[in-house]
Image (cartoon, rainbow, N blue to C red):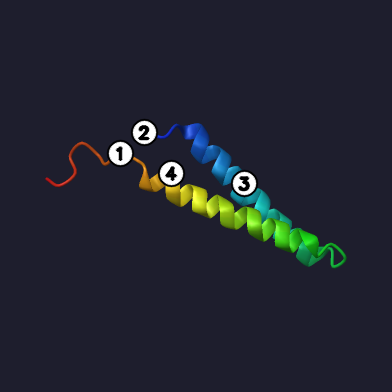
Amino acid sequence: MAQSGAVYVALLAALTAGVAGMLAAEFFHGLDVLLWAGGGLALAAVAGITAAVSRADPPADAGH
C-alpha cells in the first residue's frame, strides 16, 4: 500500500511542532506544560512515521 506524500508531510509537521513546543518550554520557564505536550506530540509523530514507513511497498527490484 503506497502512502501519499501528504501523510509524511503532516507527520513531519507534527514532529516539528512537537520539537518547537519542547524548545519553547525551555525558553519560557513558566510554560512547563509545553514540554509534556510537545514531547507527546513528537513521540506520536515518530510513531506515525514508523508506522507509515512499515506499511510502504518494497521497491520492485528488491531482492535481486
Label 2: element kind: loop
Q: Position of residue 26 (x, y in %)?
A: 77, 66
Crowd class of label 1 (few under 14; some 14 to 19; many from 20; radius 10 Å): few
Q: Which quarter of the rendering shows the N terminus?
A: top left
Q: Which is more toward the observer, 59 or 51?
A: 51
Q: Which quarter of the rendering shows the C terminus?
A: top left
Q: Which residue is mark 1?
A: 57
Type of the residue with mark 2 = Ala
Determine which quarter of the picture holds residue 10.
Answer: top right
The answer for how far apart the CA atoms under marks 4 and 2 are is 9 Å
Q: Residue furthest left?
A: 64
Q: Which mark is residue 2?
A: 2
Label 4: element kind: helix
Q: Position of residue 23 (x, y in %)?
A: 72, 61
Callout 4–callout 3 Cβ contact below 8 Å: no
Label 1: element kind: loop
Type of the residue with mark 1 = Asp
Q: Which residue is mark 3?
A: 14
Q: Which mark is residue 13?
A: none
